[in-house]
Amino acid sequence: MSVTTLPPYDYVTARYEPVIGLETHVELGTNTKMFCACPTGFGAEPNTQVCPVCLGLPGSLPVANKAAIEATIRIGLALNCSIASWCRFARKNYFYPDMPKNYQISQYDEPLCVDGWLDVEVVNDAGEPETVRIGIERVHLEEDTGKTLHVGGATGRIHGATESLVDYNRAGIPLVEIVTKPVPGIGAAAPQVAKAYVAELRDVIRSLGESDVRMEQGSLRCDVNTSLNLPGAEWGTRTETKNVNSLRSVERAVRSEMIRQAAVLDAGGAITQETRHFHEDTGDTTPGRSKETATDYRYFPEPDLVPLAPDAAWVAELKAALPELPRAHRARIQADWGLSDLDMQSVVNAGAIELIEQTVAEGATPAAARKWWLGELARRANESGVELSVVGVSPAHVAQLQRLVDEGKLNDKLARVVLEGVVAGEGDPATVMSARGLGVVSDTGALTAAVDEAIAANPDVAAKVRDGKIAAAGALVGAVMKTTGGQADAQTVRNLILERLTTP
């Protein structure tokens, strides 16, 4: 049903209880595809990385990629899952042009990894960090589909398009699907929890080195399930918002769908179980198709592949070799940096841990790196609606900028102006400072005239300083800073003022 008036979010969370669930697809970074030897590099010319197997040609037979199986087990172990001692692949039957066989080799009732969990940190209503445990239903291995491009329409979707093109380079790339258990009881924090989960999952997989998890390139894609129910009632009908491609959009998609569903329910309508599309420009979701059930896919065991039976000793060896995982890593650097739990949560929420670490590796102190990334740069990222990592400044730039401040060549005000030039693509901080003539002026000869002018223009203030009210000198320093466009060295200016007004 169509709803024109949407309720405020606070009303929605006061009246209804949300339940969310997330299905995340991760393309593995193997050299070859899941069931053939075709390369997997991103960005190749369309349909140049294909063969009879991934094109589904008659007579071709799949062979499972051991590296992909090992990667999936490592992901499952990192997510505290139990690893199956025996499992097998299945055929998931459906017709769509991006699946050349008309079925997808996946796993159904016998996945490789089951019953795990992942802890995430969010900030509760009291402003304190809180841990939420997200149950993991399953982690299974399958092959990705091809990529369809609809052209000639206004939306990039099939409706209204004049033609559709299919690139099968992606068809057959190893794909891990990670499915959470339903997550109830999180109330108004549901959007925040969803974002935190995907961010933590991305960091875990990146730390394992099994994928570049670049959402903008589609190597990590998230489907968000959302439902609402009245307190104490059965869970509501869920919708599935497909292929959400940024952390910010995951949060926005949950919030948008909660508001939309509340409006439908308040108007006496019923929620339809369906897939929905999230629109980045408006933050809204629109209907896709009715959601299929497992029986619609007619799963049956894949006859061309033998079952998987991971050896227990091999699994134990993989577990022992896991690297330091993000949660443990954060605890270590929090202690090293001397941050409170709340300060560390601010760093996590901003997606700045890796950026700060890299900035420290370039020579900045943790405090200085944190100041820039969570201050000026976070502000710019928020204004532009982008992730902090793509704001246009590198950790090396931030470290160089702070060195110029530490050396007295820039003050914080000038450093922010220099940062504007770096973001605009004018070069590194030293280049921008030189090109714009933004260095701090500390030469007493160059500043003497400005100091004398400030004293002459403010005789009352100068008289107070002569009478011993040294704090009044700050007004004269401010006048000189204004005259010099903020480029004067404040301490040098202050020394010159006191020298003139307090020396017998």
Image: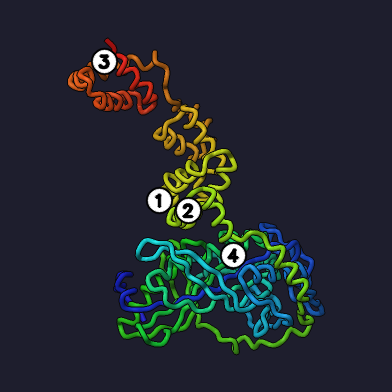
**Residue 253 at x, y percent in the picture:** 44, 68
Mark 3 touching mark 4, by CB under 8 A? no
- Residue marked by disc 2: 347
Which of disc 4 and disc 3 is earlier in sequence? 4
Q: Amino acid at mark 4?
A: Leu
**Residue 224 at x, y percent in the picture:** 50, 73
**Residue 234 at x, y percent in the picture:** 41, 87
User: How is the protein colored in the picture?
Assistant: rainbow
Mark 2 touching mark 3, by CB under 8 A? no
Residue 383: mark: 1
- Residue marked by disc 4: 220
Q: Residue at x 37, y 75 (%)?
A: 260
Mark 2 vs mark 1, foreground winner is: 2
Residue 277, placed above or below residue 452: below
The N terminus is located in which quarter? bottom left
Q: Compare residues 195 and 315 and report the one nearer the observer.
A: 315
Mark 2 vs mark 4, foreground winner is: 2
Distance from disc 2 to disc 1, alpha carbons, whole Å, reads 18 Å
Q: Residues within 10 Å of mark 4 (few under 14, many from 20)?
A: many
Which of disc 1 and disc 2 is earlier in sequence? 2
